[in-house]
Amino acid sequence: MFQDEANIYIRSGDGGDGMISFRREKYVPLGGPDGGDGGRGGHIIFSVNPKLNSLNPIKRKVHYRAERGVHGGRKNQSGANGPDTIIEVPPGTLVRDRESGELLAELLKSDDEVIVLEGGISGRGNARFASSVNRAPHMAERGEPGKELWVSLELKLIADVGLVGLPNAGKSTLLSVISAAKPKIAAYPFTTLVPNLGVVAVDEYQTFVIADIPGLIEGASSGAGLGHTFLRHIERTKVIIHLIDGSASDPLENFAAINQELALYDAGLEHKPQLVVLTKMDLPDAVAWEPILEEEIKKRGYEFMSISSVAQINLKDLIYRVYQKVQEVPEAEYNPDDEEIVIKPEVDENQFTIEWEEDAWRVRGIRIERVASMTYFEFDTTVRRFQRILESMGITKALIEAGVQPGDMVRVGNEELEWSE
């Protein structure tokens, strides 16, 4: 089943913990600290796979987690970084924060790759804290916890093939027959009000994306009706299938009118690879027009064939011929001019807030929560260092001014600490 939307949970890996260790060798009584750093946690990376054209494989899994970094070891051995988790998506995928709707990434071309969640920072081992004043530090850092997020994926398919033609030329009917798309179909002009997309299976492994572009009308190139919106979709396609209504009073005139609109909209657009297809070959009028149109169309340098979507005449031949033409064209550039641009404001990581919860004081802030998560609170040395950081950031003063008392509980991130003088 074709999926163009998916909601998934992603979590980057925790950083590895730093090691507290001292060199212990025979005849080396004061070997000094040799605890190594941990490894960085694995990133969550979104990468374009040009062979994909649906979010269905991603939607089936839902939860994606990267591995944590390896803890530091003795003899200054650093832990390995956690392996990144790479999520492959089709070209044209937008990644948004599910809660806020903020656009996090646009993955449009085959070489696009974006780190959406970075892995946790590695904790430093005690060898990194040695100084002339403290040559044997009983101090190290835990790895920073990974980040987690629910994201929404939205696929804006880049169509390989665009169906053009006057209203009622049979575009929606053809799309419904050769793909799983279910466009609105009725016997009156302008049935299609938005482009319909379908994935056409050539065989078990090969597919292409086809777009039913709503019926063009005279003046579309100058913005009449919804012309500009529809023609913009044609720009992004590799191949155009130009459908001619076999039941029309003058199919050749209709063919010329559409090509004129394409030429007026953008120089060179009419020169895209184009397969001209006469439709409704189940009707006598179309059968009568076929030899006349074939001669005239080929005389103008276009490939020609005739089909009936209702009677399913020549549809397999059409699919294979279109697929071959798509393969012959280089990958189309996708430069959307209608996507929003999200500019994230600079965030001051040193900012913090203090509030009273039901039974404790809560300190919130990017930097202080990260420091708390990386602190070994079981060691006096690292606790004193944490206290110095609280003072340097102005948090100690702010807590006192807020009314903190000895014995009160103070929560920072996932840590709960008792306040004392």
Image: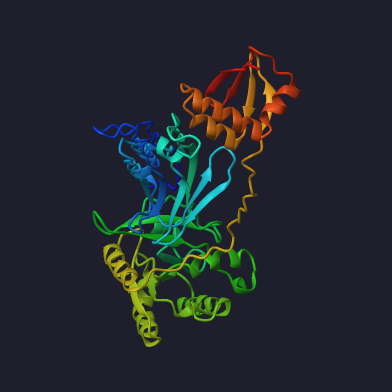
Q: Is residue 203 left or right of residue 252?
A: left
Q: Is residue 203 left or right of residue 350?
A: left
Indicate whether 37 appears above or below 205. Answer: above
Question: Quick one: 80 or 46, which is closer to the camera?
Answer: 80
Indicate whether 290 appears above or below 236. Answer: below
* Quadrant housing residue 140: top left
How many numbered marks, from 0 up?
A: 0
Q: Is residue 71 left or right of residue 402?
A: left
Residue placed farthest to the right in the image?
401
Query: Residue 385 appears at what percent x and percent y?
Result: 55, 30
* Quadrant housing residue 274: bottom left
Residue 1 visible to an observer of this rendering: no
Picture colour scheme:
rainbow
Viewport quadrant of the N terminus: top left
Indicate whether 39 appears above or below 21. Answer: below
Question: Quick one: 56 or 78, which is closer to the camera?
Answer: 78
* Quadrant housing residue 159: bottom left
Residue at 36% from the left image edge and 47% from the top image edge: 86
Question: Quick one: 211 or 22, which is closer to the camera?
Answer: 22
Query: Residue 352 appears at what percent x and percent y?
Result: 66, 34
Residue placed farthest to the bottom in the image?
299
Query: Residue 275 appears at what percent x and percent y?
Result: 37, 74
Q: Is residue 263 left or right of residue 398?
A: left
Query: Residue 100 appears at what percent x and percent y?
Result: 59, 40
Residue 377 visible to an observer of this rendering: yes
Residue at 37% from the left image edge and 72% from the top image edge: 330
Viewport quadrant of the C terminus: top right
Question: Quick one: 165 or 240, which is closer to the camera?
Answer: 240
